[in-house]
Image (tube, grey):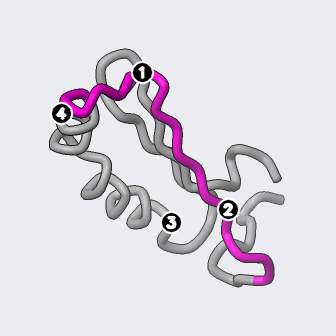
Amino acid sequence: MKASDKLRARWKKEDVWFYFPVGLGTKTDARWLHTIFNDDFVREATERGYDISTFKFEICPQGGNERFKSQRS
């Protein structure tokens, strides 16, 4: 599965960046992820001794879900 088909979050420069797959309403999934991996998450992970510059998260959509049907030709 291509990286562009996954819901992803990662540390880039000085902030968490979000990427969402092609499909119906997937941009709202990235907004939802933003409520989880926010400034509080970054601060707390750093305070707990984690290197936030190594942060990466990705999740693949379930197969056969029409919501993720590619809009590409």
The residue mark sitting in front, 3 or 1, is 1
Find the distance from the CA under tag 3 to the CA under tag 1: 25 Å
Q: Are marks 2 and 3 in contact (CB under 8 Å)?
A: no
Q: Is residue 61 magenta?
A: yes
Query: Seen in the image, is 19 located left or right of residue 31?
Result: right
Q: Which mark is residue 31?
A: none
Mark 4: amino acid: Arg
Q: Position of residue 53 (x, y in %)?
A: 42, 21
Q: Position of residue 59 (x, y in %)?
A: 61, 58
**Around disc 3, counting alpha carbons within 10 Å, would you say few (fewer than 14), some (14 to 19), or many (20 or more)?**
some
Q: Label 2 belongs to which residue?
A: 60
Q: Which mark is residue 43?
A: 4
**Around disc 4, counting alpha carbons within 10 Å, would you say few (fewer than 14), some (14 to 19), or many (20 or more)?**
few
User: What residue is at 74 percent from the left and 66 percent from the top?
Assistant: 70
From which residue to which does the magenta span run? 46-64
Q: Are marks 3 and 1 in contact (CB under 8 Å)?
A: no
Mark positioned earlier in the residue sequence (3 or 1): 3
Mark positioned earlier in the residue sequence (4 or 2): 4
Quarter of the picture containing the C terminus is bottom right
Mark 3: amino acid: Thr
Query: Seen in the image, is 72 located left or right of residue 43?
Result: right
Would you place residue 6 above or below residue 52 in this image? below
Mark 3 lies on a secondary structure that is helix
The residue mark sitting in front, 2 or 1, is 1
Q: Label 3 belongs to which residue?
A: 26
Mark 2: amino acid: Cys
Q: Are marks 2 and 1 in contact (CB under 8 Å)?
A: no
Mark positioned earlier in the residue sequence (2 or 1): 1
Mark 1 lies on a secondary structure that is helix
